[in-house]
Image (cartoon, grey):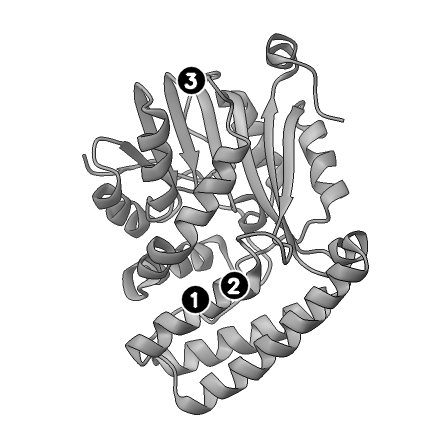
Amino acid sequence: MSPRRVIPPLSVTAGAKSGSDLAEYYEREYVHVDEAGFEEKIVADIKADLLFSIFPAGEKIGCFLEIGAGGGNILRRVVRKTNPARAVGMDLSFAALEKAKEQAPGVHFVCASGEKLPFKDDSFDLSLSMDVCEHVLSPDALLREQARVSKLLLIKVPIEKNLSLPVNSAALRLFLLARWIIRGKPMTPPFDPHVVKFSQPAFEKLIRKAGLVTLKRTVTGTPDSPDFDETLFRKRKELALESGAYPARARAIGKWFAFARTALKKLCFAVSPALYARAFNVHLYLLCVKPDGGRRRGAPSP
């Protein structure tokens, strides 16, 4: 089934000149870049395992929605795990959903903005937004919409507003610019697609503001976690070396930079996990429910 185009007006995002710039960015990313290969081989299994660690055990899923389904790698795993009666994948990028069709056959796809979902209230038993809130200008609107259309919510965001944010932002801008030049493709000038940076207290405040109760939470991305950034970086680099994607000089620079950053992170975590969370990026997974659903399924987590 081909994705259906339902595209409400887009918000203008920080770093992009217009909403159409953002849409064009994702269209070109999914059309021209083989990110799906990396995601399939490295990230999707790890993310799915962490997601299932807070999954509502024994919950029978009738209708399932993934907001920001991308190329469908996570969606395929969730559908396989939960076997919902009906599954819907939604994304801003039509090109992404064309790829998702191959990953998750039998799923219905809709091309739309997460800040204005084209679904009726309580249409879904469970919805998932994984690494989506940081990509929209109005994450509070997205959370309200997700809460409106679903009874139980799974949400994952990177926690990036920390002491290392200025360094990370500068490094990302240089990386995006270099990648844009190397590709030599006529595309929207590069910008950080993470248009909002969250601290954990600020994001959980947005959750409460959306009228949601947190049932479970887990924080990952630390040196003892399977999604530690340097572990993923090393595996991505190995695949890049196999494909000859990067020149030798860039590989050497990346190797020493990754080594120094990993050593610093591990030392900081060994001294104080709390300090690590304030200094470096981590990932927050939440299982949320509307207040009436919370009373049915149990008390919120402390």
Tell me the residue at 64%/34% (across/down): 217
Element assignment for label 3: loop
* Residue 18 in the image: above or below residue 143: below
Quarter of the picture holding the C terminus? top right
Q: Earlier in the sequence, mark 3 or mark 2?
A: 3
Check the image and report above or below for 199 versus 57.
below
| Residue displayed at 40% across by 29% down | 65
Residue 183 drawn at (x, y percent): 35, 78
Name the N-terminal-most of marks 3 and 1. Answer: 3
> Which of the 4 image quadrants contains residue 245?
bottom left
The foreground one among 17 and 97 is 97
Amino acid type of the residue tagged 2 in the rendering? Thr
Q: Which residue is identified by label 3?
A: 123
Q: Secondary structure at mark 2?
A: helix
Query: Which of pointers 3 and 1 indicates the residue nearer the eye?
Result: 1
Marks 3 and 2, how far apart in space?
38 Å
Q: Residues within 10 Å of mark 1 (few under 14, many from 20)?
A: some
Residue 20: x and y in percent read 43, 55
CB of mark 2 within 8 Å of CB of mark 1? Answer: yes
Can the viewer see residue 111? no
Q: Which residue is mark 1?
A: 235
Residue at 66% over, 57% down: 281
Residue on which disc 2 sits: 231
**Residue 201: percent from the left, percent from the top?**
76, 41
